[in-house]
């Protein structure tokens, strides 16, 4: 009997553990999760939420285009969910409103279970869905109760272009602890080709042609999200932030946390990029000794209090400092000035615990016909399971506390030398006492906590063993202008002041400095071993990229004789989404 009771307790414990490890459990209330696909188009992602995510009670399929909603309705039928479709007024049904005489909280005011199709403006729908689930009706006035609806548990924003116009309403329409998924495809702005556009949309400056532009784009988006949320006493917590194909996508949790808003400046920073080489510095907008000490204790699991009153950290926010305080008012390697990018998010990009649990599920599903044996996600075989696994594995290997990265070929080309093998370069960093990792979007990226001069010391040591090739002189240089100059009278055409003396060649300047770091290219035993995964997948087809945005010429007219045109529109939409 005792063995049976112990076995029952173990089963209960295992069952509870599986419930805790359910990827969606933290976003699901007892009555189910409510999801808004705000820019649904053909509705295919909405249907995946309904079919593949456990615990979903309601999916609201919203789009401004009536043609898109008609197409979504047809897709609901094609997937056999017509019985789950809520007809009538959908999410505008008066059943979701409650009287201020009702003593139960707003959480009991539910949208009817099922799939809701609606034609409407996404921002309008979200601005009308700002009642917290914990709010009681008697705390509201009649106008709020009549026009406002409960907040969503998850909101997905996937526009054609920038998501910036939708973020203000989205951070208000998500419940405390809810999940917000945001996609931006305006990489021309976020990537630096149009910095003025990026600053107008996100309040931050990118860097054109910087090696780390993919990660900087993510951090600019997260910065803007955190600022918008902070206006309403809310903070964000990134779960997963990735660059994929021609877009960036972030998953963040949104919390009511006014104290956390006070610490927002600690997670924002500026990037100082040398104008003549790949050296850069990332500096926070502010510092706080007390908060940083508390975070360090949590990371190191230190429980003993600080008994030294003289060094007791003070809870004071101080303005951040630039590279000048680091002893580098200009680039240490070339003497060039800095360009400034940002502000940007310098906190973590991912929740590594969730990422690791997702990897575990994908690997368990691989041995069970691509279905999670515990009954969670994935509930059906995923066509992109291999690609998704490779992406998550790459993410799990990143240094979470190191913003931005060096691109190794760019670093080596600055001194005209052959590219150092990645394993040898990272081994040299490890032998010097520094950490390093890759980046999920760039195969040649090196994220490291090593200072710039250590990176260049490794390059200089490599050049001693592998002398760089001599750069050919241009016609202008043969006429007597200084090597490395690009302008008239031998002057550099960059941000340097006019009349400055001729600049020496960048490679010559970098290689002329003494090596201060002990460089050892020996690869330690077992160094560089990685989990087997398909990293950095190639594009699935030639000329892969965003399709043309829907326009009046491509939209189906709502008429009785539009059958052929509807089929064409459906085929295009299915391919795109």
Image (tube, rainbow, N blue to C red):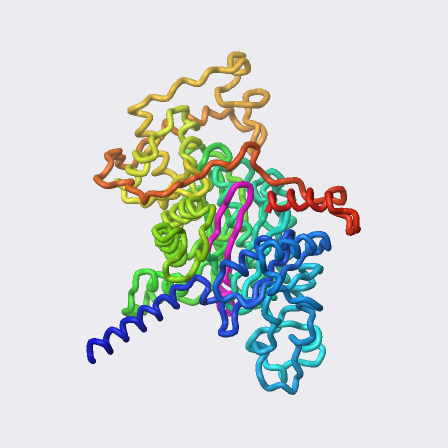
Q: Position of residue 360 (x, y in %)?
A: 35, 54
Question: In this image, 143 relative to 182: left or right?
Answer: right
Residue depicted at x 44% and y 18%: 471
Q: Position of residue 108 (x, y in %)?
A: 57, 78
In this view of the protein, can residue 231 be seen by the observer? no
Out of 530 and 331, give the one closest to the viewer. 530
Question: In this image, 538 relative to 136: left or right?
Answer: left
Question: In this image, 249 relative to 471: left or right?
Answer: right
The number of callouts visible is 0
Q: Position of residue 372 (x, y in %)?
A: 39, 57
> Is residue 271 found inside the magenta-colored segment of the image?
no
Out of 493 and 13, give the one closest to the viewer. 13
Residue 205, by quadrant, is top right
Residue depicted at x 60% and y 40%: 546
Residue depicted at x 30% and y 61%: 300
Q: Position of residue 536 (x, y in %)?
A: 43, 39
Quarter holding the N terminus is: bottom left
In this view of the protein, can residue 340 be seen by the observer? yes
Residue 554 vs 364, above or below: the answer is above
What is the span of residues highlighted in magenta in the rendered image? 240-265
> Is residue 252 found inside the magenta-colored segment of the image?
yes
Out of 87 and 356, give the one closest to the viewer. 87
Residue 129 vs 334, above or below: the answer is below
């Amino acid at each position: 009997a005792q063995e049976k009771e112990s076995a029952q307790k173990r089963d209960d414990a295992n069952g509870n553990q599986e419930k805790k490890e359910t990827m969606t459990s933290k976003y699901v209330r007892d009555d189910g999760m409510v999801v808004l696909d705000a820019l649904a188009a053909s509705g295919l992602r909405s249907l995946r939420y309904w079919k593949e995510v456990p615990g979903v009670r309601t999916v609201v399929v919203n789009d401004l285009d009536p043609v898109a909603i008609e197409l979504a309705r047809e897709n609901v039928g094609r997937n056999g969910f017509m019985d789950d479709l809520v007809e009538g007024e959908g999410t505008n049904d008066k059943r979701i409103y409650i009287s201020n005489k009702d003593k139960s909280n707003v959480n009991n005011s539910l949208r009817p279970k099922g799939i809701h199709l609606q034609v409407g403006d996404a921002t309008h729908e979200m601005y009308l869905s700002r009642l917290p689930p914990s709010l009681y009706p008697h705390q509201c006035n009649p106008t709020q109760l009549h026009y406002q609806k409960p907040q969503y548990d998850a909101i997905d924003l996937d526009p054609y272009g920038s998501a910036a116009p939708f973020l203000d309403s989205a951070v208000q329409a998500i419940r405390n602890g809810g999940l917000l998924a945001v996609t931006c495809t305006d990489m021309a702005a976020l990537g630096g080709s149009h910095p003025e556009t990026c600053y107008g949309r996100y309040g931050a400056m990118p860097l054109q042609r910087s090696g780390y532009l993919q990660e900087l784009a993510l951090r600019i988006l997260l910065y803007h999200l955190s600022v918008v949320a902070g206006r309403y006493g809310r903070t964000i917590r990134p779960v997963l932030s990735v660059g994929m194909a021609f877009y960036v996508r972030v998953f963040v949790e949104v919390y009511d946390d006014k104290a956390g808003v006070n610490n927002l400046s600690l997670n924002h920073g500026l990037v100082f990029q040398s104008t003549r080489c790949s050296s850069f510095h990332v500096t926070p907008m502010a510092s706080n000794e007390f908060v940083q000490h508390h975070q360090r204790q949590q990371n190191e699991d230190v429980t003993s209090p600080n008994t030294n009153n003289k060094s007791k950290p003070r809870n004071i926010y101080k303005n951040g400092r630039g590279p000048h305080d680091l002893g580098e008012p200009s680039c240490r390697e070339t003497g060039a000035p800095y360009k400034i990018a940002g502000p940007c998010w310098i906190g973590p990009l991912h929740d590594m615990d969730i990422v690791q649990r997702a990897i575990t599920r994908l690997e368990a599903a691989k041995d069970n016909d691509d279905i999670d044996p515990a009954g969670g996600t994935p509930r059906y075989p995923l066509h992109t399971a291999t690609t998704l696994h490779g992406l998550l594995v790459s993410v799990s290997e990143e240094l979470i506390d190191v913003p931005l990265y060096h691109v190794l070929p760019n670093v080596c080309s600055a001194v005209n030398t052959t590219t150092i093998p990645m394993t040898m370069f990272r081994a040299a960093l490890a032998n010097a006492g520094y950490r390093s990792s890759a980046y999920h979007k760039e195969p040649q990226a090196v994220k490291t906590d090593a200072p710039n001069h250590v990176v260049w010391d490794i390059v200089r040591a490599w050049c001693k063993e592998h002398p760089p090739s001599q750069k050919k002189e241009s016609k202008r240089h043969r006429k007597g202008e200084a090597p490395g100059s690009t302008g008239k009278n031998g002057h550099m055409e960059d941000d340097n002041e006019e009349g400055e003396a001729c600049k020496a060649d960048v490679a010559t300047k970098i290689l002329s400095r003494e090596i201060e770091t002990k460089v050892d290219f020996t690869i330690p035993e077992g160094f560089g071993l990685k989990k087997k995964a398909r990293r950095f997948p190639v594009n699935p087809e030639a000329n892969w990229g965003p399709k043309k945005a829907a326009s009046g010429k491509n939209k189906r007219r709502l008429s009785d004789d539009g059958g052929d045109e509807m089929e064409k529109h459906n085929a295009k939409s299915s391919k795109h989404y």
